[in-house]
Image (cartoon, rainbow, N blue to C red):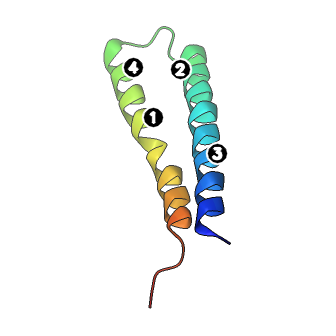
Amino acid sequence: MPARLRSFIGTILIICLVIFYALAATTIATLLLGTSPWWVHLLYFLLSGLVWILPAMLIIRWMAGPKPK
């Protein structure tokens, strides 16, 4: 697959990932954390703000293509 096409597909995937993840994280927080103390909110948003990086790293690694030998 050409590098430009791989980059284009990866960019679209990352944008979709961020949108879906933001909506899911906000929905979960709204439904479950309504009456929780402030430190639970802090911990949740700290962790949920970092977790999306893992699938994004996989997409970026795929976009980079195979390693040169």
> Which type of secondary structure does the marked residue at label 4 adopt?
helix
> Residue 16: x and y, percent?
64, 39
> Which type of secondary structure does the marked residue at label 1 adopt?
helix
Cα gap from disc 2 to disc 1, whole angstroms: 10 Å
Cα gap from disc 2 to disc 3, whole angstroms: 26 Å
Mark 1 = which residue? 48
The answer to which of marks 1 and 4 sits earlier in the sequence is 4
| Residue density around tag 3, few if under 14, some if 14–19, many if 20 or more, within 10 Å | few
Mark 2 and mark 1 in contact? Answer it, CB < 8 Å.
yes
Q: Residue 62 is drawn in which quadrant? A: bottom right
Mark 2 = which residue? 29
Residue type, mark 4 in image = His
The answer to which of marks 4 and 3 sits earlier in the sequence is 3
Q: Would residue 46 appear left or right of 20 to someone viewing this image?
A: left
Mark 3 = which residue? 12
Cα gap from disc 1 to disc 4, whole angstroms: 10 Å
Q: Nearer the viewer, mark 2 or mark 3?
A: 3
| Residue density around tag 2, few if under 14, some if 14–19, many if 20 or more, within 10 Å | some
The answer to which of marks 4 and 2 sits earlier in the sequence is 2
> Residue 5: x and y, percent?
66, 60
> Residue 3: x and y, percent?
58, 67
Residue type, mark 1 in image = Ser
Mark 4 = which residue? 41
Tell me the number on the disc at residue 9. Answer: none
The answer to which of marks 3 and 1 sits earlier in the sequence is 3
